[in-house]
Amino acid sequence: MSKTATLEIDGQKYEFPLITGTENEVAIDVKTLRGATGGITTIDPGYKNTGSCESGITFLNGEEGILRYRGYAIEDLAEKADFLEVAYLLIFGELPNKEQLDKFHADIKEESVVDDDIKKILDAFPKAAHPMGVLSSLTSALTAFNPSSVNVDSEEDMYKTVVKIMGKFPVLVAWTMRKKSGLPLNYGDNSLGYVENILKMMFEKPNEEYKQNEILVNALDKLLILHADHEQNCSTSTVRIVGSSHAGLFASLSSGISALWGPLHGGANQAVLEMLEAIKEDGGDTKKFMAKAKDKADPFRLMGFGHRVYKNFDPRAKIIKVAADEVLGDLGIEDPVLDIAKGLASEALSDEYFVKRKLYPNVDFYSGIIYRAMGIPVEMFTVMFALGRLPGWIAQWKEMRARKEPIGRPRQVYIGENYRAFKALDKR
Ligand code: SDX
């Protein structure tokens, strides 16, 4: 591979360095393009061909369906690690030893109380408010109660801010769900594991002792690991660009939650369940919905299908599909919607429209089936995605700040009106 790329414009040649990553990905470094060419820039709506950064956190290979966190295969992590270990790995770069993991968890527990005035903000929301909007607001509000979290100039201050949000975010998630279901706001039990405690906070009833269910703990732990990071996706890029202005971590996370909310991104897991339910209500005629998905005149898309990067099976979808069978089997649940999902997937995987466009089930296609089996309301599905993605967002934000990356400020090509003289009101 040569070291440079040559661009020729009107007979003038410009050379730009090629950079190669540790997995042999190659990029043209165009940092000097505008200066060298007297103002010419690039344009790439949706950044389909444009890298925003060099990162050492997550590696994806969309053609081969590979996903690794800090070099570890997602299949190994989902099978052999727990979510807190994976969070530590993503944020600090190495799998923790027992002492490091115990200290991380202890420091998180120290921070697992939120200021009671947060409840006043939560109270102000109507019950009908979408949980993602509530969570985004409460996360941003955390800055007001923890102003020191904005300063992360030292490793120590950064660590303190990390454990603050790792401790408080699950409380906000649980309270967001309990607000919707009209349950009193509670705290967990610091003698429990991180994920056990989340389930207790989410589901505990005020008048009975909460009984842990290992099936649910293991299922949620695996789902959170599978959602923990995914390189420069829409919400992570949002967290990075907001953080590049030196806004605080909590404000940056709040913006990432808003980006994840969209049905083309994390909101797809809710949209998948709503779509499968609609197919079931409609008599289970998957062919009708496939036709709608292929009809350009119809805005309907097969939710949970397709991916910007994966042009092969999303490795997470493969793992979640197996887990869905296991969890429903272990819980003794017969969910016709899972059968509809499987039918839809096998039809799409042999349909020329989907095959030609390399549209495969993605992480959102089966995850909602497990969340529903766990008793999580469908409007909370994307909140669960955010809970999993939290350590990835933190890791990416921390990397961006540690590398002292410049403020994100893309260019544009102006296509509006040329100069025109002002017209007085009575002349218009
Ligand atoms: C996530 O980026 C990440 O890593 C995200 C994520 C993460 O972990 O952070 O993996 C999580 O967001 C997963 C994706 C969840 N979204 C959905 O399931 C929504 C349905 N999927 C699509 O909207 C779409 O596939 C996207 C948004 C996921 C990807 O869109 P792209 O890469 O911009 O592709 P495109 O819209 O240009 O589509 C290419 C073609 C088009 O047809 P043509 O114009 O070539 O004829 O494929 C078609 C699209 O119409 N197409 C679909 C389709 N997805 C793409 N047609 C029907 N159903 C679909 N789902």
Image (cartoon, grey):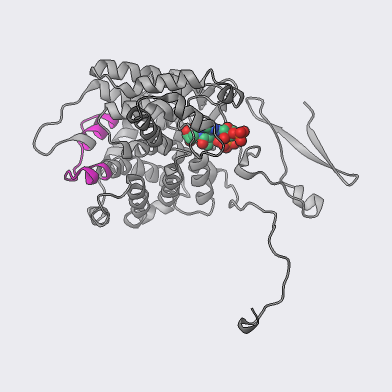
- Where 139 falls versus 263 (above or below)? below
For residue 39: magenta? no
Residue 75 location, x and y as percent?
45, 18
Assign the N terminus to one quadrant of the image.
top right
Residue 371 location, x and y as percent?
31, 29
Please name the residue shown 17% across and 35% down the image: 204
Please tell me in which quadrant of the rendered image residue 87 appears: top left
Residue 35 location, x and y as percent?
77, 52
> Which residue range is magenta in the image?
176-201
Q: Is 122 on the left-hand or right-hand side of 225?
A: left
- Where 150 falls versus 183 (above or below)? below
Front residue (pair 12, 261)? 261
Please name the residue shown 16% across and 27% down the image: 211
Residue 273 location, x and y as percent?
36, 32
Question: Which residue is farthest bottom?
Answer: 426
Q: Kindly tell me whether residue 94 is visible in this rendering.
A: no
Q: Kindly tell me whether residue 328 is visible in this rendering.
A: yes
Question: Which residue is farthest left?
Answer: 207
Front residue (pair 138, 310)? 310
Please tell me in which quadrant of the rendered image residue 177 appears: top left
Please tell me in which quadrant of the rendered image residue 226 appears: top left
Please name the residue shown 48% across and 37% down the image: 300
